[in-house]
Image (cartoon, rainbow, N blue to C red):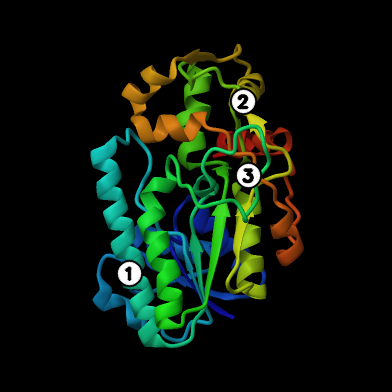
Amino acid sequence: MKVFVFGGTGFIGSRVVKSLVSAGHEVSAPARTPETSAYLKQLGGSAKAGDLDRPETLREAVVGSDVIVNLATPSFLGRIGERRLRDLSHQKLQQTKNLMEAVAEAGDIPIILSEGILVFGDSGPEWVDETAPYDPRGFARIGSPATEFAIKAVEEKNLRLIRMLPGGVYGAGSWFKESVYRLVKRGWFRVFGDGQNVLSYVHVDDVAEAYRLAAERLPVGEAIALIDDEPTKTMDFANFVAEQVGRPPVKSLPKWVGAIAAGGVVAEALTINCKVRNRKAKELLGWRPKYPTYREGIPAAIAEIERS
């Protein structure tokens, strides 16, 4: 099977490429620099033209693919206030429009889009699943216009769409390495609020496996949440990281201080409850997380960071 992966050299995308290649699929992805092209080749994929910000490059990129996977997204690292939220949201929407229009012109190619479980909003103390009302909070507010456009485009352009909704994806890279692991080791990490809110996490390798399964099984029309078996309190997650690197328990900051430091979008994402079930991923994809809880996944992520 030929799979084109937008964002194939990123934190999640590189693991998806590696998983697909390991299963015998032919994978290509955009690479803007010689370094990223070499990295893609190292993963077993091949570089191909295709830039979501340049619609004229997209039709040729997707033609001949059996499946399109879109993991490309504007960077969420750093402070996100309302102005940056609007800019990121506009960029994400335009990229999604460009992609879906190119696929509509190219032919009948299934698209796997990436969102996130924060589309379910604040679950409070209850469990939620994919039937929960659409109520984007935190980082999900960035992609909400793009999601709404994509759902409408399915009907208008007769597209086949699968929506993947990962939880807090941690591993040896991205936010976990830069904003948690390194800060915890230096004693600088802080939890916003009291840290008693429950969030759903998932190891990046398990996410990659789920995307591979989705590309192979193509559950078209479905939205599938990807989280491990045990949502956990923010403070417990952070303190487990601290324990693993030999540091004392982490401290907290009032939520309003966190909102000033990191922006309201980030503070909201880290302080709401999002306690999500993964039953659908297991039933539709046959997905079984290698790291069923953060207690197995965090030591593996830290070991990988420290080997690199």
Mark 3 vs mark 2, CA separation in Å: 15 Å
Nearer-the-camera pick, 125 or 266 = 125
Q: For the point 45% across and 16% down, which residue is it? A: 188
Q: For the point 66% across and 19% down, which residue is it? A: 243
Q: Is residue 276 left or right of residue 73?
A: right
Q: Are marks 3 and 1 in contact (CB under 8 Å)?
A: no
Helix or strand or loop: what does disc 1 sit on?
helix
Helix or strand or loop: what does disc 3 sit on?
strand
Q: For the point 63% across and 68% down, which residue is it? A: 214
Residue 84 picture quarter: top left
Foreground label between 3 and 2: 3
Nearer-the-camera pick, 230 or 13 = 230
Other residues around mark 1 within 10 Å, as few (<14) / some (14–19) / many (≥20): some
Residue 19 picture quarter: bottom right
Asked whether residue 30 appears in the rendered view, the answer is yes
Q: Are marks 1 and 2 in contact (CB under 8 Å)?
A: no
Residue 286 picture quarter: bottom right
Residue 237 position, x and y percent, is 63, 27
Residue topped by disc 1: 97
Which amino acid lies under the numbered mark 3 shown in the image of this protein? Val
Residue topped by disc 2: 241
Which amino acid lies under the numbered mark 1 shown in the image of this protein? Lys
Q: Earlier in the sequence, mark 3 or mark 1?
A: 1
Q: For the point 27% across and 73% down, which residue is it? A: 55
Asked if residue 270 is positioned above or below residue 100 in the image, the reply reads above
Helix or strand or loop: what does disc 2 sit on?
helix
Mark 3 vs mark 1, CA separation in Å: 28 Å
Q: Quadrant of the C terminus?
A: top right
Nearer-the-camera pick, 177 or 36 = 177
Q: Earlier in the sequence, mark 3 or mark 2?
A: 3
Residue 224 position, x and y percent, is 62, 59
Q: Is residue 187 left or right of residue 97?
A: right
